[in-house]
Amino acid sequence: MCARRVMTRSGGRTEANRQAVAQAALKLISEGRLLFDVQDIADISGVHRTTIRRRWPDRDALLAEAMAEHTSRLSVDLMGDWRRVLKRIAFGNGALSSTISPCRSSTRRSAARYAKTPTCG
C-alpha cells in the first residue's frame, strides 16, 4: 500500500488556503449556518472546491479545522485557581470576551457547569 503524500508549496499558498477555509467556516458558524457545504466554503474563501474536498473530505473535517483555528488564537494563563480562569475565559476579561466566538454560548454553559464541580483530591 502506498502512503499518501501531502504536497506543500513554497510561498505559503497551502497555509493561506487553510486559513481562508478556516475563516470561511468560522464565518458560517458564527452566522448559525452549521449545515454548510463545500460550495459555500469555496464561495467565501476563494479556494476551489476540489482543493477543499481533497484536504477536508467532509463537514466534520471543516468544522474541526475551524475550531482548531479559533482556539489557536486563545491565550490562557493556567496558573492559580482553575475555576476563576475558566470563568474569566467564558464570561469576560479573557480571550473570548474580545472576539466574536461561534462557540461562546457552549463555552459559557460548560464553564458554569464545571465551576460548580467540587475540587478533586
Image (cartoon, rainbow, N blue to C red):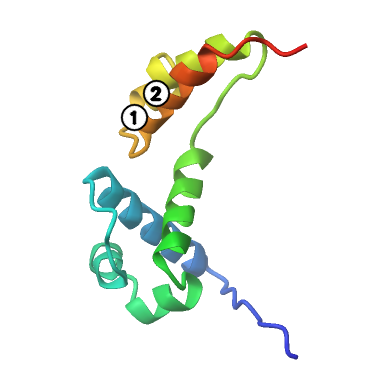
Label 2 sits on a secondary structure element that is helix
* Amino acid type shown at disc 1: Ser
Specify the amino acid type for callout 2. Answer: Arg
Q: Image quarter for residue 6?
A: bottom right
Q: Nearer the viewer, residue 24 or 108?
A: 108
Q: Where is residue 102 in the image (x, y as percent from the top left)?
A: 33, 39
Image quadrant assignment for residue 118: top right
Residue drawn where x is 59% and y is 78% of the image: 7
In contact (CB < 8 Å): disc 1 and disc 2: yes
Q: Tell me the quarter of the picture where residue 112 sits.
A: top left
Marks 1/2: CA distance? 5 Å
Q: How many labels does the image show?
A: 2
Instruction: Note whether 62 is above or below 79 in the view shown.
Output: below
User: In screen coordinates, is 109 left or right of 31?
Assistant: right
Q: Is mark 1 on a helix, strand or loop?
A: helix
Q: How crowded is mark 1: few (under 14 residues within 10 Å), some or many (20 or more)?
A: few
Q: Which mark is residue 105?
A: 1
Q: Name the residue under label 2.
A: 108
Q: Look at the image and tell me in which quarter the C terminus lies.
A: top right
